[in-house]
């Protein structure tokens, strides 16, 4: 039992670290974007670079929000009374992958683009979105099962069957 609590705490710590460091990174990216906007950098602001500006703004926004999702996920792991290995084995790496692929796809899509279309890096986005969907659905399912296990009705059913 102690080992599973330590493993749960290790996963939570991993996501707290990932969340805070990525939040720092993406907030810094936002400051760089605002600075380019403030100094009217043509490479970023010219009408011909609208795709770049949109893609990089989306990278900053998605990265920041996913950083916060990591912090919420870490807090969720901390409130679980016991190890949930499926949540740790599936949701945790999927959330990490989504947090790299989604903003990375937006950023790469804006780095090199063709007319009004983002570059090939945008292909990372659907993969990241799928990973995020898996992580969130697994977390929701795990928390739903947790509620069923501790509900008064489930305790009554367990006592009746015994």
Image (cartoon, helix red, strand yellow):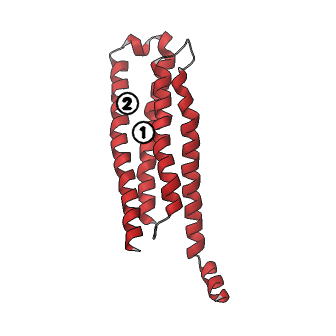
For the residue carrying disc 1, how many other residues have a C-alpha within 10 Å: few (<14), some (14-19), or many (20+)?
Answer: many
Q: Position of residue 112 (x, y in %)?
A: 48, 17
Q: Decide: is 85 above or below 127.
A: below
Q: Nearer the viewer, residue 65 or 136?
A: 136
For image coordinates 58% across by 35% down, the residue present is: 126
For image coordinates 36% across by 13% down, the residue present is: 41
For image coordinates 59% across by 60% down, the residue present is: 141
Q: Quadrant of the C terminus?
A: bottom right
User: In the drawing, does residue 20 fall left or right of residue 117?
Assistant: left
Q: Quadrant of the N terminus?
A: bottom left
Mark number, residue 19: none
Which secondary structure, mark 1? helix
Q: Position of residue 12 (x, y in %)?
A: 39, 57
Q: Nearer the viewer, residue 100 or 72?
A: 100
Q: Position of residue 109 (x, y in %)?
A: 50, 23
Q: Position of residue 14 (x, y in %)?
A: 37, 52
Q: Nearer the viewer, residue 39 or 148?
A: 148
Numbered circles on residues, count: 2
Q: Decide: is 140 above or below 33.
A: below
Report the Cα–Cα distance between label 1 and label 2. Answer: 9 Å
For image coordinates 55% across by 75% down, the residue present is: 150
Q: Decide: is 10 above or below 37.
A: below
Residues at marks 1 and 2 touching, judged by CB atoms closer than 8 Å: yes
Which residue is the site of mark 2? 30
Which residue is the site of mark 1? 64
Q: Earlier in the sequence, mark 1 or mark 2?
A: 2
For the residue carrying disc 2, how many other residues have a C-alpha within 10 Å: few (<14), some (14-19), or many (20+)?
Answer: some
Which secondary structure, mark 2? helix
Q: Quadrant of residue 145?
A: bottom right
């Amino acid at each position: 039992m102690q080992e599973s609590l330590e493993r749960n705490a290790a996963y939570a710590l991993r996501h707290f670290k990932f969340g805070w460091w990525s939040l720092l990174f993406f907030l810094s990216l936002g400051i760089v974007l605002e600075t380019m906007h403030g100094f009217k950098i043509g490479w970023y602001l010219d009408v011909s670079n609208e795709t770049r500006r949109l893609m990089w703004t989306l990278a900053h926004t998605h990265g920041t929000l996913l950083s916060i999702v990591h912090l919420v996920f870490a807090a969720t792991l901390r409130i679980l009374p016991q190890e949930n290995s499926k949540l740790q084995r599936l949701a945790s790496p999927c959330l990490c992958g989504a947090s790299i692929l989604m903003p990375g796809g937006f950023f790469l899509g804006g780095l090199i683009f063709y007319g009004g279309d983002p570059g090939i890096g945008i292909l990372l986005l659907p993969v990241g979105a799928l990973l995020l969907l898996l992580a969130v659905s697994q977390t929701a399912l795990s928390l739903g099962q947790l509620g069923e296990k501790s509900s008064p009705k489930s305790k009554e059913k367990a006592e009746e069957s015994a």
